[in-house]
Image (tube, rainbow, N blue to C red):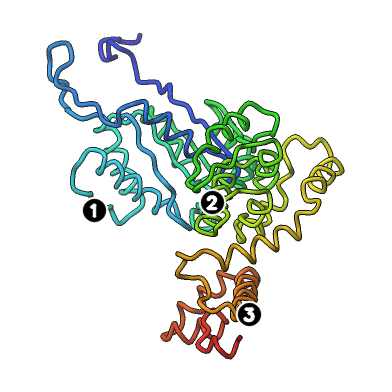
Amino acid sequence: SVSWQHHPESGYFKSQAETITIVGMSGSGKTTMIEQVMDHFPQIIEHSSYKGVFPGFSKQIVWVKINCPYNSSVRDLCEEILQKLDDAIGIERTTPEIRNGALARQIAQRIKSSFLGILVIDEMQRLKFSRTGGESKLIDFLHEIVDSMGVSMVFCGNHPFDETLTKKMRIARRAESGGYMKIKNVRYDSQDWQSFIHYLWPLQWTNVETPLNDELNEKLFILSKGNIGLAQMIYRGAQLKVIGSGNEIITGAVLSASVPVLVSHTEEYKDTPLPGAATEDEEAKWLSASNEGDASAKIMAEKSLKSLIPGDIDRPQHKEFVGKIDEVLRNFDEKILSLDHDLVINRTAEKKNTYDALQRCGLINIDPLNKL
């Protein structure tokens, strides 16, 4: 026979926590969306009594958001979680245990004592699974938090984090137990884009107002490929180019000249299809129609805008040097884009004289006049 006298009256603990995974391109609004949702809830709730009795603790953490450290391992992530929990409660940072097992128990104790509600881990693509013992070990560790402590989790990351989750059914099932959301770049004809552009466009700091029309709306959409974060960068860059130039009207050519150089050369940007285009031919037709007559206008805009801003201390002080200086800067941009950045960083770190190492890589010019 089974004796029930040793069983708790309220029953045994059964976790109801789940995991939500959010994946999307950089700049699509994942982090902004999560932070806006979390801002609706206090991070800390201070308890004084429960049914007239002091509950045994005063501060409860409702949510904590963690950004994965760059090139991080499970241990790096654990230490970041521990620090964020300490910061939220307002106590001195706990010294992490040396051994990983002890560190995991240390985090579990802190989570339980603070009655954490939800743990959000952003920038999951930064995790290097070669340093974590494989994705299975990492996911198992994170879901131990969900299962044994009843803490819901949100995973958020860029591609290729989603590929990691689909390698094994067990990992995929647990990672989307509470839902899976893939945030895509918005379509031009969607309410999301039209609402966004009508909020963004009035934010002008130029001395004349450029009214929004269909041509400029479509141009900004095509250049940004419907990426909200990139559209803001282009629009801000366009205003920086024209302010003080004598002609502060924003045109399609100015928008084209304001596309960030490094972003436009990334494979992710090049491979991203234009939202709303059913086929590649339709996309090419749309891009071609938008770019008609724009190439020469863009070049003229770049040349005039670089040399006409009187308050810009970076502008060439002598007009006869403008062309040559622009050529040197363009060559430097091409040099930056062609470099193997990881290789340069590693080689520089190995050298005692960082200055000489960068000079040999062509990143420092000690005799610019001869370059002209």
User: Residue 115 in the image: x percent, y percent?
Assistant: 28, 29
Q: Is residue 267 above or below residue 208?
A: below
Q: Is residue 90 above or below residue 100?
A: above
Which mark identifies residue 324?
A: 3
Mark 2 highlights which residue? 239
- Residue drawn 17% across and 21% down? 55
Q: From the viewer's perspective, tell me whether residue 327 is left or right of residue 37.
A: right
Q: Amino acid at mark 3?
A: Lys
N-terminal-most mark, 2 or 1:
1
Q: Looking at this view, is 176 or 22 the one in front?
A: 22
Instruction: Name which quarter of the figure residue 263 lies in.
Output: bottom right
- Residue drawn 30% across and 57% down? 98
N-terminal-most mark, 3 or 2:
2
Q: State which quarter of the image contains the C terminus.
A: bottom right
Q: State which quarter of the image contains the N terminus.
A: top left
Mark 1 highlights which residue? 95
Q: Is residue 46 above or below residue 348?
A: above
Q: Is residue 309 above or below residue 209?
A: below
User: Residue 284 in the image: x percent, y percent?
Assistant: 83, 46
Circle 3 packing at 10 Å, graded few (<14), some (14-19), many (20+), is few
The residues tagged by marks 1 and 3 sit, at their Cα atoms, a distance apart of: 56 Å
Q: Nearer the viewer, mark 1 or mark 3?
A: 3
